[in-house]
Image (spheres, coloured by chain):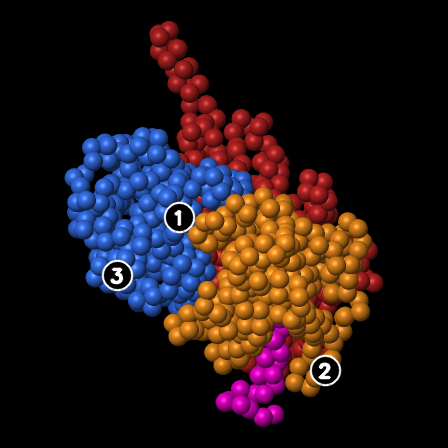
Amino acid sequence: MAATKEYAAAPPAAAVPAIPRHQVMAFAVMIAFFAAAPFFVYPLFMMKALCFALFACAFNLLLGYVGLLSFGHAAFLGSAGYVSAHAAKVWGAPPEAAILVGTAAAAGLGAVVGYLSIRSKGIYFANITLAFAQMIYFFCVQTPFTHGEDGIQAVPRGMMFGLLDLRGTLTIYYVVLAVFLVGFLLVYRAIHSPFGQVLKAIRENEPRAVSLGYTADHYKLIAFVISATLAGLAGGTKSLVFQLASLTDVHWTMSGEVVLMTLLGGMGTVFGPVVGALIMVTLEHYLAQLGSWVTIIQGAIFVVCVLTFRRGVVGELARLLKKPL
Amino acid sequence: MNRTLLITLAAALALAANPAQAQISDGVIKIGVLNDQAGPYADLAGPGSVVAARMAVEDFGAAKKGMKVEIISADHQNKADVGSSIARQWYDAEKVDLIVDVPNSAIALAINQIAREKGKAFIVATAATSDLTGKACSPNTIHWTYDTWSLANGTGQAIVKTGGDTWFFLTADYAFGHALERDVEAVVVKNGGKVLGKVRHPFPTADFSSFLLQAQASKAKIIGLANAGTDTTNAIKQGAEFGIVRSGQQFAGLLVFLTDIHALGLQAAQGLVLTESFYWDLNDQTRAWSTRFAERHRGSKPTMVQAGVYSAVLHYLKAVEALKSDDGPKVIAKMKEMPTDDPAFGKGVVRADGRKIHPMYLFEVKKPSESKGAWDYYKLRATIPANEAFRPVDQGDCPLVKK
Amino acid sequence: MTSIFGVPTQALFGQLLVGLINGSFYAMLSLGLSVIFGLLNIINFAHGALYMMGAFVAYFCLQWAGLGYWWALLIAPIVVGAVGIVLERTMLKRLYHLDHLYGLLLTFGVALVIQGAFRNQFGSSGFPYASPAQLTGGYNLGFMFLPTYRAWVVVFSLGTCLVTWYVIERTKLGSYLRAATENPALVQAFGINVPRMITLTYGFGVGLAALAGVLAAPIYQVNPLMGADLIIVVFAVVVIGGMGSIMGSIVTGFTLGVVEGLTKVFYPEASNTVIFVIMAIVLLVKPTGLFGREK
């Protein structure tokens, strides 16, 4: 996206910097918050927030750091969910295998969709990813293993590594937290590495990066696949948490939601998507009684964010503190 | 006698005599009415079901008996994930003891599972799939009002016997539609009819034109609508547009509610044959109850599922009172023990597989000239006695039934 | 009765005709989107919601003012077009200097607000709307019974599309619009009020959507979600036709409706997906669309 001035300042590009202290502190705060949360808040709700936070982080890698708006990311979330659910329920796979199979499916899908889409830019990229996502959605509606409108229900949670009984709420909560942290750190590592530096170079000025000898398309594709894979990780975990895989997770409105989470939290920031996901999940949960008000408020947040709040919550915070978050 | 002993005895007696509260979880019987409040099933259940539930609590006299009963409600938007999240949240965090209503068979099946896991009670008054008392039967669940088997047995059989022997199905593509299509097809074939084709339409669908064309091309005498709510009414209206009835085919509304006829109007719906388990104008008791309901619900007479919610909640409360506990499977077991009796369905019984038994009625929609006013839509064609109306208890593959 | 590839011709022609009718809506909606993108470089995600508003205005005209269908055809585009103009003036204007994707996100948000508000107020099962008395009944074509109203839809949308194409591609006003997109500063220097032209164009595009909504009311019934899933298909049509190409959208809209109808006969499960498959193929082979020009 061309409006790069809108992002929070990136760390100096001279060398790959050591992890800044304030980011370590923010990370510690985040871990402390999530570790303590299940004792104060309904754990299922927090697990939903964690899964969506991972989804948003994965999406942010593509949007915030590569500058590619994929309007079909729900395809990876949802199809991984279906594959994991099927693996756990029909093949009787233990939870770690089920999640991994789902993640692998998303990675494969990401590779195919990415390969076909990466040459398009801007609007066309958004449109083509949307088209592929719709194809995947209708495939999910038709194909028998997903059971269409009913979804895959009663997905067993099983015993993780043969030791941890995931039916216990606290047990599964900390497993989900661990999965989230793995994904989060992976994204962090991808960004703060030579690979991440090249991505930033491509985002800022692709022709120049190409002239320097970097095959921009390869880098973008790799980033796309990483993003799709982690979205799949979120989806696979989510289907085990809720013991359900349904069409909602592959529908294009879900793709819209993750865009909103990332925009609201702060595109191109490390912690932005987590904050954005938390806010959106909370909003949906507490306003669920009010039915359609959730959609109205989501739309209003979109409008406000695009018009006046483009940096998002964490982006604005970073600007105030004059440090990247 | 020793004074201390007397006092201790008196105190013990007082504690023992404390009504129900001792074993009711948190001292409150919390009932959640979960249904579709704004979508295709909003009129046949929706807010009306909540009214019916509250009437049941009042008629039971909870206040006078010192029992605290709370009713909450939510909209599942016909989405499996929304419905199961709400159910989980209700059972886990909000201490709901009973979930009732739930149109949409897919969601009902999901909650059936959740209720079993959490040891709570679940009464399905609105969803249709006969699997709830078949393969998916559970000691925590009772299926009230009707099911796809009883509809097939009523409407399906009646139509085939009067000459409608070739069928084409227009099916809502989810658990309910599939179950209804399966059960009606079995009846059609058993009575010597043939199914010439079927097409599954997304749920919900606004435009049936391409599906209706396929139905026309099949030349089947009967186009079976294995769907409900606005899908059924849209299909019938558009069928009129495309001249379906004019060219000699007939619609069979396999699941039709009073509110659907109200939306269609008698001009479009006249002659439609349907099966229901309740109609406001059946007898004096139903008339009296329905008038009270209409006063609280915008003058609309109750549908069979709203009556079902009333009947189910009333029986549940009676069972809780008798058992002095709201423990899920125990109350369900008690409900199976006690015969039912209420002004909507009269006397009935709940079977071992969780199936509530009562007569089913075959109705025909009146011609506009035969109707005396709003809601006067049905004439009674036949009554199917309770013991014949539902699938025999040993034919459902329900593991709760000992063979 | 003859058969083509094992399918009776009766069924084939019937579905083709239904496909043509659906194609009319695709064409009209993608026309509006194309006009807006071609001349303003805005991707109007709110198009579906505005189409829905058009249908609702028709419904209200009948309910509150007793004004029938023919009045609605006039009133709805004006009312909804006015809403569009307000939208453009207050919000879209501020995004012109930014990446196009922000425009997409803003209109997406607007769509959510509009759809949510209507769903909140009116539920999601919708209201019936009868076709006008002059257009009830139908013709027995032998292979199917064609309701008059649906024939009207095809004729009217074809007419509207051709008139729009003519105005934009063949008249002076149209040439000003096209020039203003290519080089707004220069055209402004010639004394033409470019911002006003842009606003009016957006209003026009939105008005087209509302018109399609009125056309749709008797067929699809008036409900708050009627535009939501349609908009994605229309996007695909616009991309295939070439974003910004008026003729491209018209031709593609009708053609894809027919293709969808054909798919329903031979391979019904794929009928929802075929448009997206075509879009993916077209984008891979000719990224600017079939009739599109490089921007």
Task: From the top left corner, tell me how far across and down residue A297 is, in percent.
Answer: 51, 41
Q: The blue chain is which one?
A: A
Q: Which color was chain B given? A: red
Can you identify the residue that label 3 sits on? A210
Q: Callout 1: few (<14), some (14-19), or many (20+) C-alpha neighbours within 10 Å?
A: few
Looking at this view, is A84 or A1 the one in front? A1
Left or right for B173, reference B373: left
Q: In this view, does C146 lie above or below B363?
A: below
Residue pictured at 37% horizontal, 13% vertical: B8
Alpha carbons under labels 3 and 2: distance apart: 64 Å
- Circle 1: element type: loop
- Circle 2: element type: strand
* Front: mark 2 or 1: 1
Which label's residue is closer to the chain start, 1 or 3? 1
Looking at this view, is B260 or C86 the one in front? C86
Alpha carbons under labels 2 and 1: distance apart: 58 Å
Q: Quadrant of residue C174?
A: bottom right
Do the residues at pointers 2 and 1 share their chain?
no
Q: Look at the numbered discs 2 and 1 and tell me whether their residues touch, using CB distance below 8 Å.
A: no
Looking at this view, is B235 or C270 the one in front? C270
Identity, as a three-letter code, of the amino acid under mark 3: Val
Q: Quadrant of residue C26?
A: bottom right
Task: From the top left corner, tell me how far across and down residue B101 is, in percent.
Answer: 53, 48
Identity, as a three-letter code, of the amino acid under mark 1: Ala
Q: Callout 2: few (<14), some (14-19), or many (20+) C-alpha neighbours within 10 Å?
A: few
